[in-house]
Image (tube, grey):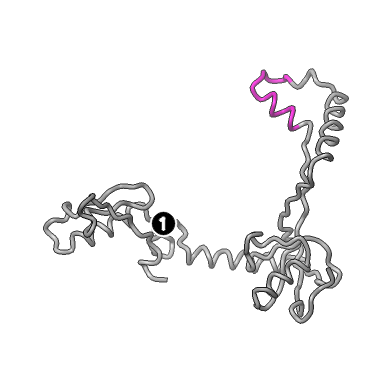
Amino acid sequence: MNYDELVPKPFEVLIRGHEDTPAGYACPTCGAVFSPRSFRDRTDALELAARHASEHCAQVCACGARAATSPCPGCRAKALAVTEKERFLRAKKVSHEGYEGPLYCPELGGDNQGYFACLADLHARFAAANVDAPPYAWACETITFRLDAQQVVGRALEAHHEGATGGLSPDAISRLQQTLDEWCAELPVIVTYEPDYSRAVLLGDLKARAPAA
């Protein structure tokens, strides 16, 4: 990745009726404007204005590259790859045979952002994309929507004096919890998945055949 790919492109500043040539350039992060008039003694004044605008909020990465963020995209990708490798080495390896539950496979992305309700859904995704199965996917924990009475009361009393919860008996909290549980049970099922990086589901020859639904 070269310098120009790392540094974000500046915005052109145009004057109505004279759109053929930019009047200057603006920093894509903060909007600071740079005019070629500041470099009137240079034949490349417009290019210098563009360069100053693009670099205005750029940062210097530890590798020496300038980018909109630090670390730069290249270093960030390397760090993520190292983290992923270390996670996999530490994780318990689980065969996809007999595995039941949601999975997380960011390589497949899509509208579900890499989350799949089951192995069959994951298989359908990479089969439809006509790509090989990744070597593994992460198991997921299922989080079902629930309201905690203690937390609800605590947040409701944040604006009140310290110790305001002292007047609420455990029985009162328990009765509120029962009411909240009954209310949540009446709602449509709301489920969220979170990667469980302690378990790596080995996909092996999954592409060779569709798993049972």
Q: Quadrant of residue 93?
A: bottom right
| Residue 197 x %, y % | 72, 60
Asked if residue 202 can be seen in this view, the reply is: yes
For the point 69% across and 29% down, the residue is: 155
Residue 50 colored in magenta in the image:
no
Circle 1: residue type:
Ala
For the point 73% across and 19% down, the residue is: 164
Give the total of numbered labels. Answer: 1
> Foreground residue, 181 or 94?
181
> Foreground residue, 164 or 33?
33
| Residue 186 x %, y % | 83, 39
Q: Which residue carries the number 1 mark?
A: 68
Q: Is residue 212 above or below residue 36?
A: below
| Residue 85 x %, y % | 64, 69
Read off the magenta span: 151-164
Q: Quadrant of residue 177?
A: top right
Image check: 186 left or right of 61?
A: right
Asked if residue 55 can be seen in this view, the reply is: no
> Foreground residue, 75 or 24?
24
| Residue 134 x %, y % | 68, 74
